[in-house]
């Protein structure tokens, strides 16, 4: 009697396809793991390269006298001189931070759709106990720089600048003493004071200034105009202080 090998052949084909599938899957996973290792290596080399650039090109300004309004290049950006303080120079970024830069910073805080054409409010437009010193759904308390949206954005921008961070580590980036009208601070990056933003003729820029509460709403006095901190949208321009070369 002739044997029927069709079942054996069918099972063999199924197992063969299964083995081919397994081999292909293993190759894909191995390739994926290899690519992750390569990507990690490239990212590490890139970071080392950026750190190297900062290490061998430390952020220092040429030893000379700088005029108010003079343009200088620091950390791959153009800055405007606010004041030459002798051995150190205060600078304000020539451009505004972009909507992308603002959105990326706030998205890490799970705050989305906050930026509006390169502008943001100083506080949220809804109650949130974490931001701007709010006390309730109906009371928008006097804002504080330490809990403002602008501070979150500036710190994110600073942390993503390898050259400025290296300048901080080498002592060429100097801390600044300033106030928001409520508390005193000592930090490497901040908003301009109202007088500083007027020096560069930028009335649409957020500045550190006195705030007060009226009818449950936090107001800020920006260049003589009182604006609600949670519903007024303005741009952000960082201020830093850099040492001159010795």
Image (cartoon, helix red, strand yellow):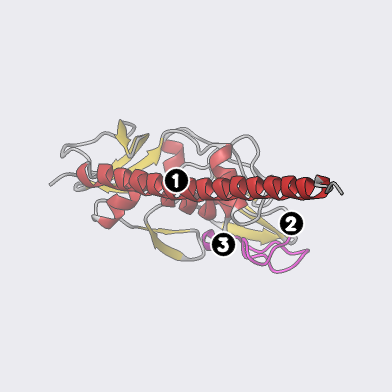
In percent of width and height, residue 162 lies at 35, 47
Magenta includes 112?
Answer: no
Which comes before the other along the chain, label 1 or label 3? 1
Q: Earlier in the sequence, mark 3 or mark 2?
A: 2
- Of circles 2 and 1, the one toward us is 1
Left or right: residue 165 compared with residue 107: left
Q: Which residues are magenta?
A: 126-146
Q: How many numbered callouts? A: 3
Q: Is residue 87 visible?
A: yes
Residue holding disc 1: 39
Residue 239 seen in this snapshot: no
Decide: few, some or many residues near mark 3? Use Cα within 10 Å; few <14, some 14-19, many ≥20. some
Picture residue at 52% right of the left edge, 62% below the top: 146
Label 3 and label 2: CA atoms lie apart by 14 Å
Q: Which residue is mark 2?
A: 126
Residue in the foreground of this view, choosing between 56 and 224: 56
The one nearer the camera, 37 or 209, is 37
Residue closest to the eye, 64 or 34: 34
Q: Main secondary structure of the magenta part?
A: loop
**Which corner quadrant of the image does residue 6 belong to?**
top right
Label pair 1/3, CB-CB below 8 angstroms? no
* Residue 45 position within the rendered picture, expressed as x and y whole percent measured from the top left: 34, 46
| Label 2 or label 1, whichever comes before in sequence order | 1
Q: Is residue 148 left or right of residue 86?
A: right
Q: Pointer 2: residues within 10 angstroms few (<14), some, or many (20+)?
A: some
Q: What whole-number distance in Å separates the C-alpha atoms at marks 1 and 3?
A: 36 Å
The residue under the point 36% across, 35% down is: 79
Q: Which residue bears the numbered disc 3?
A: 147
Residue 115 percent location from the top left of the image = 64, 42
Element at label 1 = helix
């Amino acid at each position: 009697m002739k044997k029927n090998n069709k079942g054996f052949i069918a099972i063999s084909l199924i197992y063969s396809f299964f083995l081919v599938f397994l081999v292909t899957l293993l190759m894909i996973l191995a390739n994926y793991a290899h690519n992750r290792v390569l990507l990690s290596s490239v990212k590490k080399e890139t970071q080392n390269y950026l750190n190297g650039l900062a290490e061998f090109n430390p952020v220092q300004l040429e030893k000379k006298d700088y005029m108010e309004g003079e343009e200088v290049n620091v950390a791959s950006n153009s800055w405007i001189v606010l004041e030459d303080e002798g051995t150190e120079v205060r600078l304000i970024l020539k451009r505004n931070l972009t909507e992308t830069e603002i959105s990326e910073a706030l998205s890490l805080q799970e705050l989305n759709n906050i930026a509006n054409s390169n502008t943001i409010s100083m506080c949220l437009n809804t109650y949130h106990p974490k931001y701007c010193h709010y006390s309730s759904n109906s009371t928008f308390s006097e804002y504080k720089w330490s809990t403002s949206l602008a501070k979150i954005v500036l710190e994110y921008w600073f942390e993503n600048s390898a050259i400025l961070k290296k300048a901080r580590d080498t002592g060429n980036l100097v801390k600044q003493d300033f106030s928001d009208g409520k508390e005193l601070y000592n930090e490497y990056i901040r908003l301009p004071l109202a007088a500083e933003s007027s020096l560069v003729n930028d009335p649409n820029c957020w500045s550190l200034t006195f705030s007060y509460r009226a009818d449950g709403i936090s107001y800020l006095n920006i260049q003589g105009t009182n604006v609600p901190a949670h519903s007024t949208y303005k741009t952000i321009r960082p201020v830093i202080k850099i040492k001159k070369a010795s």
